[in-house]
């Protein structure tokens, strides 16, 4: 007779007063505000609905659980464990600390042959207590649940009257371990190692390491921005620990519950920090990934790789540059319907959310979508890190000269390194260029969004908008070639007679309101147009799309959320565009309706719209306004350098190194001026207290600690501590290039001096930042009320130049010379002399002389007035004829 051990826990049944009617999963799971999931029983109900919808049942199932680390993720995992235990789930694979990227989760589901996975992510949406959370179910192939299952989840949730939950304590998520609770086995697994092993089996890591070592002397650099999302640990493990890049090649790599207050969507708007650093530092290869790691962006100095071009280029090089595809071959290529047709010129296929079936059937190898998603059949999800490694492999391949039969791509003038720009231009020459962009109108009123769509449904072939005539239009539907399922209303397509197209879609991935997505595409084989920026290339097509949809009229939205459209500015230089990589636009006053004293550095800062004089001091917690350790500056020499000095130079060095002030024979640098100003500052707070101090500019003078600050010290406090570094427009790279040119080439090539060159560049950039911050503060202090409020009176000139300066353009000498040139240089040409004579004769002539009316008696009769005008016109005509 067998005995049964009693269960290790008890199960409670919770009765619901009413079921939830709003738990309909979208294409990427259920996404709502955190406060919605925190409602009593809300999250428990949806998790229960998922378990009940598993085709094979929850009992004895094995599930992978993890997420992107956003707020409420840990709480949700504890609920999943307890509800899974109550439903008889046999095993849970849980990512350490709750961290598991979406691609890594897909890999683990396939690796462990799990029943499925529950992913806690809202993808690229912001995180934190006031933002978004999401729960998504993936099936046994590692891909997102198909509509049949998501519909079943929704149906169950609407009729759910109760749920069961195990009475067990919370488990430790931070330590890898194996835990057994009754019949439930839980394994807390290393989130990174399995995925790293997967990547090492796809790409040739030794070859990539060799390429990096060889390309670094050619100034090849990488910067990977994880945007404080889930891919940070993966990026550090792969790019730093495995491939040998430096620690400075990864940024924002620590996952945070609120993504550092940012929006973890890898595009030019939200990944602006990466964009600015790539431009300022001249980074060869920049990349970013989103919150859960399934999206990516590829950029470089002066080049942005459109996601549609990205998947097309990867497809073109895959069987040559990536070992995985050299073994398996290319079975097929696919794109989502709205994605640019660039990949169609390499091969043809359709649909993204249905890619999993095609992969399972062995009909697909590489796929991509325009929303920065790229992937392959190694898993059943998009994969951001994979895409970055794919591009790195392409760079390694095109820069490998070992194969004499390989067609060499021409590199940029004067460069031995073939970069992103060269690869793209070669692709355009080979296949032509598709100008493509997507514009998102987020959180639009649902009724108004539907009005736009309903109007578009009435459009017919033959209608003309601008220079574009509709040739064909439909509401796209997709029939899966494997299971023959049909998905309708996937987007309104309008194909024009020249082959251009626009697409409108309503998206449900946001947590509030509706999102209208506008896709615009235009193809050209004119090589002269390959170098145009995308907004210029599709400017007239955007205008046609807005005209036919009446989108602005219905929604009142003159600009999309991302990226802004301004047709009137399409031909302006980047600095003057409302949307540019640095976003340094002089029109911010009108847009944000602020007073002059509230504006900080309108023409200096890329994010001036986020700054306000009222909040300067609140941005950085206290500490000494200036780090006293900075007084030990450039006079310090290494021991080796010191030993090479003769006695005279040693004595001179000993004398100078104790003074933080450079010799008075040359102007002080901005940094040195600050150090000099703070020499007299008596206040030196302890490190423990410094983190607690926040100086408020409204009440700076009344703060006990700040009472010792003079006006000048307060002035420099705002310069040094009040303006965040990421609010300063990066230095023009051409400036640094011009400076570095003064260093002899033979010295630049000396390995021992590379570090000194980096120090010099860092010093130049530091001086640039301080000088720019001073200009911003000076701009604020132009307002007398601001000076009074901040208790900073007019300050004396900081520096009297000790060198003779050439006259500035507005100097009276320059003005006088300019006037003389304008008056006299014209007559050096005989033709101009003749024209000048004619001008002198006729300059004072008028058709109508108003003074002739003065002696007349007014008012005049109509006849007298007409006769007077007629006589004057006849007189003027006679003068011209003579």
Image (cartoon, grey):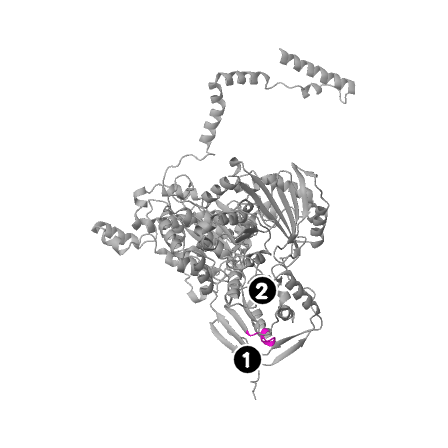
The image shows residue 485 at horizontal and vertical percentages of 65, 57
Taking the image as drawn, is residue 633 in sight? yes
The image position of residue 56, as x and y in percent, is 61, 70
**Label 2 crowd bin: few (<14), some (14–19), many (20+), radius 10 Å:** many
Badge 1: how crowded within 10 Å, few (<14), some, or many (20+)?
Answer: some
Q: Secondary structure at mark 1?
A: loop
Depth check: 175 or 277 in front? 175
Give the mark nearer the N terminus: 2 vs 1: 2
- Residue indicated by mark 2: 139
Left or right: residue 307 compared with residue 20: left
Q: Which residues are magenta?
A: 84-90
Q: Is residue 708 magenta-colored? A: no
State the image coordinates of residue 53 (x, y, percent, origin top left): 64, 68
* Residue 185 located left or right of residue 242: right
Q: Residue furthest top?
A: 882
Q: Nearer the viewer, mark 2 or mark 1?
A: 2
Q: Residue under circle 1?
A: 182
Quarter of the image with the C terminus is: top right
Front residue of 372/71: it is: 372
């Amino acid at each position: 007779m067998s005995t049964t051990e009693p269960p290790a826990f008890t199960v409670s049944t919770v009765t619901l007063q009413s079921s939830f009617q709003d738990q309909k999963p979208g294409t990427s799971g259920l996404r709502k505000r955190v406060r919605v999931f925190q409602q009593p029983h809300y999250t428990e109900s949806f998790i229960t609905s998922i378990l009940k919808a598993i085709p094979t049942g929850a009992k004895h199932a094995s599930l992978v659980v993890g997420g992107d680390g956003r707020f409420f993720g840990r709480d949700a995992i504890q609920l999943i464990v307890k509800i899974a235990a109550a439903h008889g789930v046999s095993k849970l694979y849980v990512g350490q600390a709750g961290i598991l990227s979406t691609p890594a989760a897909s890999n683990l589901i396939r690796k462990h042959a799990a029943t499925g996975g529950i992913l806690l992510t809202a993808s690229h949406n912001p995180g934190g207590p006031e933002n978004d959370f999401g729960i998504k179910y993936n099936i046994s192939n590692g891909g997102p649940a198909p509509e049949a299952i998501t519909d079943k989840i929704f149906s169950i949730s609407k009729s759910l009257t109760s749920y069961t939950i195990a009475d067990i304590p919370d488990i430790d998520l931070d330590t890898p371990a194996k835990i057994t609770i009754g019949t439930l086995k839980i394994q807390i697994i290393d989130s990174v190692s399995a995925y790293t092993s997967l990547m090492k089996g796809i790409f040739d890591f030794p070859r990539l390491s060799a390429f990096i070592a060889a390309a670094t002397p050619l100034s090849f650099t990488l910067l990977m921005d994880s945007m404080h999302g889930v891919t940070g640990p993966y990026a550090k493990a792969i790019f730093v620990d495995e491939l040998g890049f430096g620690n400075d090649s990864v940024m924002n790599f620590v996952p945070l519950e609120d993504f550092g207050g940012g929006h973890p969507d890898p595009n030019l708007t939200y990944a602006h920090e990466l964009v600015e650093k790539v431009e300022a530092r001249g980074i060869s290869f920049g990349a970013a990934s989103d919150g859960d790691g399934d999206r990516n962006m590829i950029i470089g100095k002066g080049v942005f790789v459109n996601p549609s071009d990205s998947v097309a280029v990867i497809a073109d090089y895959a069987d040559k540059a990536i070992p995985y595809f050299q073994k398996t071959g290319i079975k097929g290529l696919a794109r989502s319907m709205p994605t640019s047709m660039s990949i169609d010129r390499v091969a043809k296929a359709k649909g993204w959310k249905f890619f999993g079936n095609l992969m399972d059937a062995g009909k697909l190898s590489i796929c991509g979508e325009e929303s920065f998603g790229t992937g392959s059949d190694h898993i059943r999800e998009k994969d951001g890190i994979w895409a970055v490694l794919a591009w790195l492999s392409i760079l390694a391949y095109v820069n490998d000269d070992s194969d004499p039969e390989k067609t060499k791509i021409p590199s940029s003038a004067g460069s031995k390194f073939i970069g992103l720009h060269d690869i793209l231009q070669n692709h355009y020459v080979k296949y032509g260029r598709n100008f493509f962009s997507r514009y998102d109108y987020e959180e639009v009123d649902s009724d108004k969004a539907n009005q736009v769509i309903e109007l578009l449904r009435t459009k017919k072939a033959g209608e003309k908008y601008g220079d574009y005539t509709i040739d064909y239009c439909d509401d796209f539907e997709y029939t899966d070639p494997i299971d023959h399922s049909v998905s309708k209303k996937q987007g309104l397509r309008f194909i024009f007679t020249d082959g251009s197209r626009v697409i409108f879609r309503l998206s449900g991935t946001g947590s509030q309101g509706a999102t209208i997505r506008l896709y615009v595409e235009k193809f050209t084989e004119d090589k002269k147009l390959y170098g145009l920026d995308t907004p210029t290339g599709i400017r007239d097509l955007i205008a046609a799309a807005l005209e036919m949809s009446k989108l602005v009229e219905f929604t009142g939205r003159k600009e999309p959320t991302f990226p802004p459209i301004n047709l009137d500015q399409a031909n302006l230089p980047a600095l003057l565009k409302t949307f540019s990589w640095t976003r340094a636009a002089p029109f911010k006053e009108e847009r944000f309706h602020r007073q002059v004293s509230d504006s900080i550095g309108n023409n200096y800062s890329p994010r001036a719209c986020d700054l306000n004089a009222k909040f300067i001091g609140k941005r950085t917690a206290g500490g000494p306004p200036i780090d006293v350790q900075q007084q030990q500056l450039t006079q310090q020499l290494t021991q080796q350098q010191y030993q090479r000095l003769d006695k005279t130079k040693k004595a001179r060095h000993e004398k100078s190194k104790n003074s933080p002030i450079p010799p008075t024979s040359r102007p002080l640098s901005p940094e040195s001026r600050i150090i000099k100003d703070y020499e007299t500052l008596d206040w030196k707070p302890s490190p423990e207290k410094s983190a607690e101090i926040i100086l408020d500019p409204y009440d700076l003078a009344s703060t006990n600690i700040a009472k010792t600050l003079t006006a000048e010290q307060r002035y420099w406090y705002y310069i040094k501590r009040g303006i965040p570094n990421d609010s300063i427009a990066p230095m023009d790279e051409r400036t640094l290039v011009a400076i570095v040119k003064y260093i002899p080439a033979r010295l630049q090539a000396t390995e021992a001096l590379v570090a000194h060159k980096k120090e010099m560049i860092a010093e130049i950039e530091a001086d640039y930042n301080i000088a720019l911050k001073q200009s911003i503060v000076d701009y604020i202090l132009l307002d007398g009320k601001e000076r009074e409020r901040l208790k900073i009176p007019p300050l004396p000139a900081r520096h009297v130049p000790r060198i003779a300066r050439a006259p500035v353009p507005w100097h009276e000498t320059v003005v006088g010379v300019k006037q003389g040139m304008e008056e006299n240089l014209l007559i050096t040409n005989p033709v101009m002399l003749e024209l000048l004579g004619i001008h002198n004769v006729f300059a004072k002539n008028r058709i109508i002389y108003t003074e002739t009316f003065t002696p007349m008696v007014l008012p005049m009769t109509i006849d007298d007035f007409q006769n007077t005008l007629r006589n004057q016109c006849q007189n003027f005509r006679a003068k011209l004829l003579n």
